[in-house]
Amino acid sequence: MKRVNVRKIFSVGIYLSLLSLTYNLNAQTDWVRWEGKETLYELPAIHHHDNTVDKSSFGMILLSVLRNTYYFFISDLDGDNCPFEPSCSAFFLQSVKETSIFKGSLMFADRFTRDINFFKGTDHYPLLTSRKFSDPANNYTLHSEKIKL
Amino acid sequence: MISKTKPNKKLLITILLIIIPLTTANCQLTTDGNILSFQNRLRFGNYLYKDQDYLRAADEFKEYLRSENNDTVVFRLANSYFQIGRYTEAAGNFKGLFFNSQLSEEARLMFYESIFFQNDYKLFRVLAEERNFDSSLYGKDIERLKYISYFLDNTDLPSENIVLKSFPDSVQSRLINFYQQKKFPQHKSPTTAAILSTLIPGAGKIYTGEIGDGITSLIATALTTYLAITNFNADHQFRGWLFSGLAAFFYAGNIYGSAASAQIYNARIQFNFDKEVKLFFEQRNYFLPKVDY
Amino acid sequence: MFVFSVKAQDHLSIQLDLANNLFNNKQYYDAITEYKRLQFFDSTKTFNYEINYKIGECYKAGAKYDDAVKYFSLAELNARTDNELFDSKIQIIRTNILRRTSDRALQLCDELEKDERFNGKRDEINYWRGWAFIFADNWDAAAKSFAKINSNHELIKLAEQTEKAKVSVTFAKVISYILPGAGAIYTGNFLSGLMSLGWNLLSGYWTINSFVENRVFDGIVVGELVWLRFYRGAIQNAEEFAFEKNLEVSNKSLRYLQNEYKGIKP
């Protein structure tokens, strides 16, 4: 009988502390004005390759089309192989867009080497919710102010 | 069975007795009947303020201040903005209490805090020199905040003695450590990394701590070079050139990547240092005294 | 004294009207302010149930479900009748459905069903249980829940049709193990399925040919880097296509429920 009481008091204590927690958290919800919002019933769609053609320059159009061709004939058919986000092909396009075709190719060569390294892990790359390693092109442009960890 | 359920009911009643006053506390009767009178707005605002519902509290205080003048309410209005991170509005309202107010000292401290938490440390240091805003009560706290700001941005640090003397003895050794790290960060040179990789593929990456990447790069370059040579020797011209191209691709990519890797290494050191320093000061609430009215 | 309390009561009623007006105009943030003001000045706690219930509704309308559950729970504590108790509990269930914590919603439905006070409200409980199953993407169980209300319930047909339109993820995968690309064709992705099959035939031929011609190294490289890759890819794609097709089937029904269905929604 005594043991039951102790347990109950303990659980009531936990409940009260949780309640006081929500009591404080509640205030934070309203620290910014908000409007009514309808939740979409739909389930979130699956993420696909980005197929948009980059029209910023002739070179980028050519590269985007090449990339899409690669997606269509190979990448969409051989399964999910790249452990990085963005994938190697997308990384290449980002690199060229951020720098130049020459520097972008060097960045891609480095990325490719890092990709075939068997021992890559979370100590060097942050893991995203998609279970992929985050490795954006802007970290490799040799402009240290662009690095985001 | 009955004896078992009885204590449950008692317990339930006890819980309800504890919870209901907790959740519906502070109810007051209207005396003049008009719920929206400025006095009632103030009472409701004070209740919201205690409940940490700061944005709503601020709206009530603003309404009250339209018809009445009260320094405590202005202070609370400013502090409401401060608490929800609207530091510019907070600073503006605290500044209004600088002169001819009983709360002048506290308002000055909170004004500086508002500027500090906007993360514009350069502006903070300029304002900290403003003699007009001096606080006799909290001058030391504001000065300490100024020295903390040096740890949080990229400005050159003043001399060690000046910085350290504002802080208590218990944290001196930690701060000396931070000071040294900030002044002489353990960086790796991108140029050295690139040169190392030019001499031995992958060496630059090993230098920056990316051992796996370095070895991979060495193997990839060596293997493609070997395949290029054997194919040329066997008179397979096309394959020879193909593997030569690949070897050059890996070799050059690695030199570039080693320099980039050194930069990322440095950025990571900086990032971790900034995080550690921020946490250190945050845990000690930036050595600030607690003021509230 | 009597006159005074009537007067105060009047003010409180006016305040309640003001708050309700804001609520009806979808100004939820301001409505909460006014409900809180009413609560603060309502010394007799006459409106405690209504206030907490309404604040819960405001947060629910703003998709702030954790806060909504908190206030509906407060309403539950302040309920004066079984009906009020039931209404606040149902609101908690509906909020859990929208929050996609369907397990919690189903658990609460079970608890309500066991409560003898609510024996006459089984239909309503089953209705929300059906919705909880819909949000858990379990259309079969949803159909069964709606059937308990009425064998002609309009949502039975929708749930059954949705369930029927779905493809089997396992089947799509298994047939892809046997014939690469078959799973993709089964889910309606003909071009992708045929291209998968083509790659597998081509790389299979390369691999076998290399071994036949005694080029073992080439055989291993092509087998591992090309054939196996496309073989695995075909299975992965079959699973993904089937999953995506089912998602689209569910979403079509969910869109109908959100935009066209006239009945009461969570």
Image: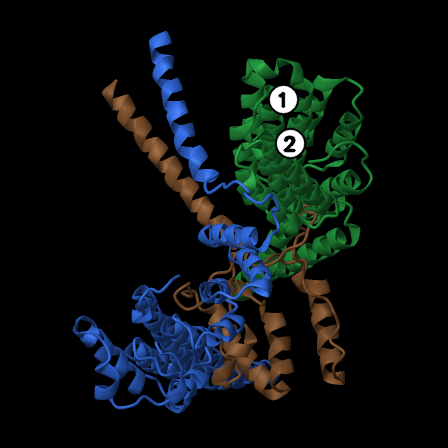
Chain colours: A brown, B blue, C green
Q: Is residue B281 above or below residue B24?
A: below
Would you say residue C114 is visible in this rendering? yes
Q: Position of residue B267 (x, y in %)?
A: 41, 79
Q: Quadrant of the N terminus of chain A?
A: top left
- Counting residues from the N terminus, which is met first, the one under dot 2 or under dot 1? 1
Q: Position of residue B15 (x, y in %)?
A: 39, 29
Name the residue: 39% across, 36% down.
A15
- The label shown at residue C133 is 2
The foreground one among B274 and C137 is B274
Q: Position of residue B134 (x, y in %)?
A: 36, 83
Q: Quadrant of residue B208?
A: bottom left
Comparing marks 2 and 1, which lies closer to the viewer? 1
Left or right of B142? Residue B21 is right
Q: Chain of mark 2?
A: C
The foreground one among B127 and A64 is B127
Q: Amino acid at mark 1?
A: Asn
Left or right of C99? Residue B93 is left
Q: Which residue is mark 1?
A: C83
Both marks 2 and 1 on one chain: yes
Q: Amino acid at mark 2?
A: Phe
Q: Position of residue C248 (x, y in %)?
A: 74, 45
Left or right of B233? Residue C137 is right
In space, the residues marked 2 and 1 are separated at their CA atoms by 25 Å
Q: Secondary structure at mark 2?
A: helix
Q: Is residue A40 above or below residue B239?
A: above
